[in-house]
Image: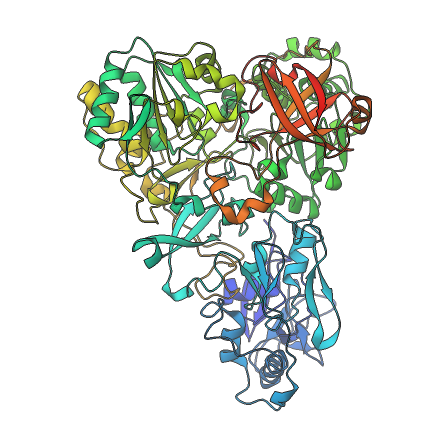
Amino acid sequence: MSKLVTIYIDGIGYEVPAGTNLVDVAKFYANNDIPVFCYHPKMEPVGMCRMCLVEMGSVEKDRETGAVLLDEQGNVKIRWMPKLQTACTQAVYDGLAVKTQTQQVTEAREDIVEFLLTSHPLDCPICDKGGECPLQNLTMRHGPGVSVFNFDDKVHLAKHVPLGELIYLDRERCIQCARCTRFSAELAGDDVLAFHERGRSLQIVTVSNPPFDSKFSGNTTDICPVGALTTADFRFGARPWELKDVPSIDPYGPEGANISLSTRLDRDSGGIVIIKRVMPRQNEHVNEIWISDKTRFGHHHTRHLDRLVAPLHREKNALVETTWDKAFKQVADKLKGAASVGAIAGPGLSNEDLWELRQLVLAAGGSEKSLGIWPATMSGGEVIKQVGVAKGTNFSNMGKGTVIVLVATDLEEEAPIWWLRAKTARDRGATVVVLNGRSTKMDHYAKFSLRYDYGDAIGAVNSLAGHIVNGKLHKDDALGRVEGFSDLQTTLKKTKAYAGYEAAAEAIASAENVVVFCGAEGVTLSQHADLMQACANVLVLTGHVGRTNNGLIAVWPGANTQGALDLGYSAEATADLLQNPPAVLIVAGCNPVGEDVAAAKLKDVDFVIVTSQFDTATTEIADVVLPQQSFAEREGTFTSGERRVQRFYAAQGVIGDSLPDWKIFAQTRQLVDKSHAKVSAGAVMAEITKSVAGYGEMGYKNLAQIERQFPDVGGNDLYYGGTAYQNTGGIGVQWPVLAENAEAKLKVAAVNTEKSKAKGLLIVPTTLLYDRGALFVRSELMSLRIPEAHANFSPADAKKLKIQDGDTVEISVENATLVVRAKVNETIPAGVITLPKCLSDQPGLFAPVVAGSIVTQALVATGD
């Protein structure tokens, strides 16, 4: 923690952390809102709007003793600067003094507001920002009563300018604060907005193709202090004071981003409460105040016309509507008489859903070995229990002295908020190390960009560990609690050392803090547990476990894969279910048949039960289809990839007769084993707290606890005007890992580094943020962001195969043929085809479920 210094605001002394921004300090400690427009706590100050002008000075001290000098009345003597200074560019230091309420300051603020309003339209009654607008609020508080400017001198500009399909610009309302351009270029790393023209004609333009090409574009509408930037789905949709904001959690990503669902009764939706917009909810531990565009605009599936509204069962080879009572009885009867039972759960199921599904499968005679997760691409949950990031880890506190390592992941596509937080930590001085088979966006910010051959990710991480051990860079004091070091040391001496890894290994070993993100790109399921262990070896050997801001994070697919692993589900179980299908299979909240050719055997299962929001390829093979509620219609919890359990709340009216999954499974189990069905999600979580290791403190009351956050961005006073909403739903609770117990023994282990011997082109399925998943594809607003099905070829392979960029090609692998568009991409290494998952209505290579499927030799042929 920074040392405390004494500063004086309007004559009152305050002890505050040294080096923090004066504007933030004044607000947090003195409850003094120094007005700002261009300043924002998450960006570097520029002092360009001049709204924050204050009188500034320094306490006078005796030069010899350093003692504070007092005047004749006993007050602290202060030497004031002759002119007003910008508060937003001032970091606090001992003895700083400011006056914020003098006549000189008041007149300066009046002048600035008057200048800003000279060409600003009087749109407040119809402006989307009205009611949460800093310009509106500060004009009422600090503006002049009259203006000397001639009305006829106003400059009129375009009022409905699309900056792409998601964001619209009203150029008349823009006050040129540059928050949007600075956020895009400095924080998001997307240089896609710029100023054009000069003087009073100065305006924002997009300079990218496609326009406003950023995964974080919606955040600019939040930080805009006026109504210049609006989102396409909320523009003229409702007034802020009509909305009820309900705390929720991002249903798509492993980061657990906190969001608010702004809801209102809607006539056009049948008079039910619906989501009008999605806004970030401040949680400095998780997503700060940012969300991705997928999170913001991907909610429209919740009220889509294609939603399933009633149970279906199969009659004469067709699915027809039935009642819940009949559906429950049919499913229960099948489960009670089944020779074998299994379940595959999607990553969007809550912990409560997963628990009741687990209990149902066990009641019907199944076991944990028949509890699968989807996508089944990653393993290593036991490694996380040992060396996951310690409690209290916060990327906001990382900078100099921190090393962030990315292994086998394209983080911006797989977990954009983690990417953004890692990138901003790098901006504060953290060192980034990227290990991957190809270049990704994070390579632009990495100090060490290390390549390896696809299929040898484990060997690459072992190479780092080898340099650490063989160079005696490991921490001797850490070895006292380590088991398996001798065997690992012997193995590492024989490990192939990748050239150029030495400096990265030294940086990791000498760092104060190290966090490793481990993905699964180019890695089979059977290899992934070993890759996780290899990453754990590096962390344990260098002593970077069991401490805040140190440890391992798995880049799990979906919102609650970590929770599924905690409750006994596994990808290995899914692989077994796909190879040896049970007599009765429950597929909950996922579409394996439509996504992966490896799931084709599920069509042969005797009886399939599916819970889903929409018709999918998996519901087409089902005998019973049960309509599930979306995340917005129910309450529950997700566990993030940082092991933070967080609550989300029911916000939207229920669509049709759909039910939450936990209730579907609980009522079915009641018919199977005569158990008493739980009456609420909270009651289910209460049972989980008594039964699941690490979840003892995860009751709903604890999860709802809040704290005051610094900087205070999401306050109800709308100081930053809709930048983010105050966290009233809870900041969540992390469960601890074994390494946090100083007495616990930690395991290092030699892991398999054998590479596939398959010859030919290597097909590497990759993840894109925007895909044709059953939920996201229903958000039509985002349709232009979803690319067509394609495969990426290296220039060398494309030339060898006589493939031109844009050709249609057939890729045959195992028993399937994929028809995609060819793209020639210089970031792809020779001998490799990267194949983005889930971009077609036909199943593809979604996950390396069958051993070797991700590295199977492929036949590539050009087509028309």
Tell me the residue at 46%/65% (across/down). Answer: 236
Give the answer, above or below, for where 76 lies relative to 4.
below
Q: How many marks?
A: 0
Instruction: Measuring from the top left, give residue 760's x and y in whole percent.
Output: 73, 14
Q: Quadrant of residue 55?
A: bottom right
Instruction: Measuring from the top left, give residue 726's x and y in whole percent.
Output: 44, 56
Of 725 and 124, the residue lying toward us: 124
Residue 147 is at least partly visible in this image: yes
Of 295 and 657, the residue lying toward us: 657
Left or right: where 650 falls relative to 857 = left
Left or right: where 562 falls relative to 504 = left
Q: How is the image coloured?
A: rainbow
Residue 407 is at least partly visible in this image: no
Instruction: Measuring from the top left, give residue 297's x and y in whole percent.
Output: 50, 49
Left or right: where 297 falls relative to 412 = left
Give the answer, above or below, for where 112 lies relative to 380.
below
* Residue at the farthest front position: 864
Tell me the residue at 59%/58% (across/down). Answer: 220
* Quadrant of the rendering where the C terminus is positioned: top right
Tell me the residue at 69%/77% (across/down). Answer: 79
Give the answer, above or below, for where 87 lies relative to 547.
below
Of 806 and 77, the residue lying toward us: 806
Left or right: where 123 falls relative to 270 = right
Give the answer, above or below, for where 122 lies relative to 448.
below
